[in-house]
Amino acid sequence: MTKTIDLDEQARDILKMNDRGGYTIPTKGLYPYQWNWDSAFAALGFAQFNCARAWAELETLFSAQWADGMVPHIVFHKADPGYYPGPDVWGGTGPIPSSGITQPPIAATMARLIFEKDQSLGEEHMRTLFPKLRRWHSWFMQWRLDQGAVCVTHPWEAGRDNTPEWDAPMARIDPTDVGEYVRRDTQHVDGSMRPTKYDYDRYIWLVQMGRRLHWDQQKLLDENPFRVADPTMTFTLLRAQRDLLAMGQMLGLDVDGIAEEIEILEQGAQTLWNPEIESFDARDAHSGEWANCVSNASFLCWYAGLDSEGQTKQLQRVLDKVQYGVPSHDPESDKFDGRRYWRGPTWAVMNLLIGLGLEERNHPLAERVRIATKTLIEESGFSEYFDPTDGSAAGGQGFTWTAAVWLSWAG
Ligand code: 2M8
């Protein structure tokens, strides 16, 4: 009991420590800016003790929304040489210096959860956010669909940077003209827990291409060799659209077209079912090839409101295989690496989304996912991610989103 109270306090302290005034950084040193989905999780964390601060987090994020509706994946409020690639490399064209890509759209869902805790002030904030969320979701619908599933155009967009799902499309990129650059991430954490130079050359090459094209979506659609229909984006957008529709209806706002978009996404989500491996999977939008990967994003189907017996079997299997699930990559695959970032480790934030979906659908595995996450944090603290085989801490420490998961769900 005392331990739990201490952890509550520690989690609140982490949020306050990473608060830069209106926005929260993921962790000091490694990630010194505002990240899109990290911020939405931070808002949910703040809502457990300070709803006004939670709304401020989302409003600051949306102050960086581009004219075309996109909400960038990093907002560079104040330049910091400790992170690469910074604002000058990205050349984002929004109102505040930013990256040129986006991240999983979970803000509407987090806003709805915060609204449910804050009925008094919440309505006013929701009314302000609603049209901005609507424009962001419409941007996805306009630019990112492949057979109704949502595509990523850079491995960083799905937030699962070096997952094996990108291996084949990444191999087609020739980054020989990328030039010299200095990575900063490996100065903060051990390189064995980070993506490789092979990956980084391609990440930076894609950024250089986007910048050269001034982040024009039509030109990127024509030129970008990396376009993958992804379960993270598809399931999170489907869920976000459902939440937006519910909020709009509750507040009597204009929800015209959202129900139709939900239908498109529902059909799109089904196109990500790979019958060969019997799992939701990523599909290369250029070649049509499957990634043939069971990842933690495959388990977001319940969060998106979709039941799946096949996916339940997969979840049972991976949870039986490692003690501290849900692993980001299939522990029975030869590409599984328990400490390398999105190629195996367990991420508390993904578990939160997976767990919420399972709980809402009264799924028998729901409690198992929550308890695994709670145990990880109790035993190894507020780490960026964890080795699913032994539960040890990995990546950055004092991490905002892990603290938010503790306060809002796992603890
Ligand atoms: C990681 O990604 C950034 C690039 O966006 C990086 O490695 O530099 C990912 O884990 C991503 O999901 C997360 O939002 C970000 C900040 O925590 O770090």
Image: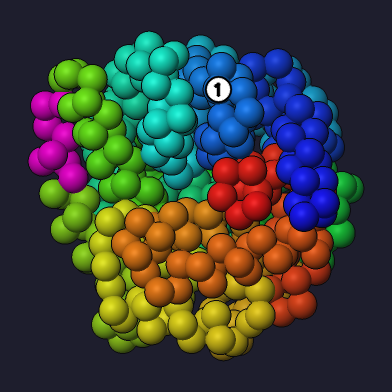
Magenta-tinted stretch: 255-262
Asked if residue 18 is among those painted magenta in the image, a careful observer would answer no
Where residue 210 appears, x then y in whole percent? 49, 36
Where residue 125 appears, x then y in whole percent? 41, 15
Q: Amino acid at mark 1?
A: Cys
Total numbered labels placed on residues in the image: 1
Residue 276 against residue 64 in the figure, above or below: below
Is 320 left, or right, of 105 in this rendering? right
User: Residue 215: in sight, yes or no?
Assistant: no
Q: Secondary structure at mark 1?
A: helix
Q: Residue at x 46, y 60 (%)?
A: 354
The N terminus: image quadrant: bottom right
Q: Residue at x 37, y 69 (%)?
A: 363
Q: Residue at x 31, y 54 (%)?
A: 304
Report which quarter residue 142 is drawn in: top left
User: Residue 274: in sight, yes or no?
Assistant: yes
Nearer to us in this view, 139 or 370: 370
Residue 91 against residue 378 in the figure, above or below: above
Where residue 372 appears, x then y in whole percent? 63, 69
Q: Residue at x 68, y 28 (%)?
A: 24
Is 110 left, or right, of 268 in this rendering? right
Where residue 261 appears, x then y in whole percent? 16, 41
**Residue occupied by mark 1:** 51
